[in-house]
Amino acid sequence: MNIVLLGPPGAGKGTVAALLKKELDVPHISTGDIFRENIKNGTELGRKVEAIMASGGLVPDDVTCEMVRDRLGKDDTSNGYILDGFPRTIAQAEALSTIDDIDYVLNFVLDEEEIVRRLSGRRLCKSTGRIYHIVTNPPKKEGIDDETGEPLIQRDDDKPEAIRHRLEVYKASTEPLIGYYKDKGLLVDIDASVSPEDVLASIIKAVGR
Ligand code: AP5
């Protein structure tokens, strides 16, 4: 089953994808995570995208589409995948349609006030990518990852100015995908305001698993 997670920044896509991948036994492919991994490893791609990501802008479509085409060609995608953060523009959606058929596009619905609350309180472990929230999902010991004991970090693009810019970019470039996928009969709205476990349950129901 090939699933796309669509929705504004901070709606909980990464959090729920970590649960959903265990249910479906398919890989979670997050373009944001792949870019961050490249930045961490100092690759040429990482150097190219670092400033764009820190400001909350979008990486150019050609760079992103080539990276996704390459990733979806790997053997572990043969039983399906969860695509998180891609497509983000109509051009990316058109490119995806030339790579593979998508079964469901799950549209995470959440109001802006809660989005800002979630993003400004998010912390993560740099090496494992594990996501926390200082209020709703804190680590056992403040500022420290439960598993690795490493200090948690705040993403550069979770600073107030970058959050504002990401929301503008989402409205201008990504929101049009809601109509695009609705017209194709693939879109399912998911209430993202409830707990991650309840979001997962509504997804399982929606995809019939
Ligand atoms: P990306 O990493 O994809 O960021 P995003 O889409 O902005 O999504 P986020 O990771 O911010 O949020 P999320 O929905 O996964 O929420 P999370 O689960 O973490 O992209 C980053 C950047 O990379 C882009 O800005 C761009 O520069 C570049 N990029 C990536 N893909 C691209 C593309 N296709 N084209 C061009 N550029 C691209 O949760 C957020 C917080 O809320 C956490 O603290 C969590 O604990 C908490 N939380 C989650 N769920 C719940 C819940 N149900 N209840 C309460 N709290 C919750």
Image: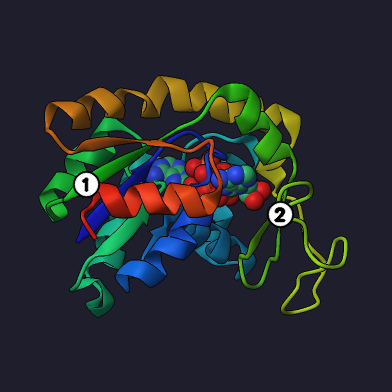
| Disc 2 and disc 1 in contact, CB within 8 angstroms | no
Q: CA distance from mark 2 to mark 1?
A: 28 Å
Instruction: Locate the C terminus and report the quarter of the image it occupies.
Output: bottom left
**Toward which corner of the image does residue 93 lie, by quadrant?**
top left
Residue at the spot 62% in from the left edge and 72% down from the top edge: 128
Q: Position of residue 28 (x, y in %)?
A: 39, 64
Decide if residue 142 is on the left or right side of residue 46: right
Residue at the spot 85% in from the left edge and 61% down from the top edge: 143
Ligand 1: which quarter?
A: top right
Residue 89 visible in the shown view? yes
Give the total of numbered labels.
2
Q: Nearer the viewer, mark 2 or mark 1?
A: 2
Residue at the spot 53% in from the left edge and 40% down from the top edge: 194
Q: Position of residue 43 (x, y in %)?
A: 54, 67
The type of residue carrying mark 2 is Asn
Find out if the beta carbon at label 2 lies less than 8 Å from the nearest ligand 1 atom: yes
Residue 64 visible in the shown view? no
Q: Which residue is mark 1?
A: 104
Which SS class for mark 2? loop
Which SS class for mark 1? strand
Toward the right, the furthest residue is 142
Task: Identify whether 169 is placed above or below 13.
Answer: above
Q: Earlier in the sequence, mark 2 or mark 1?
A: 1
- Say which mark, if any, is on residue 137: 2
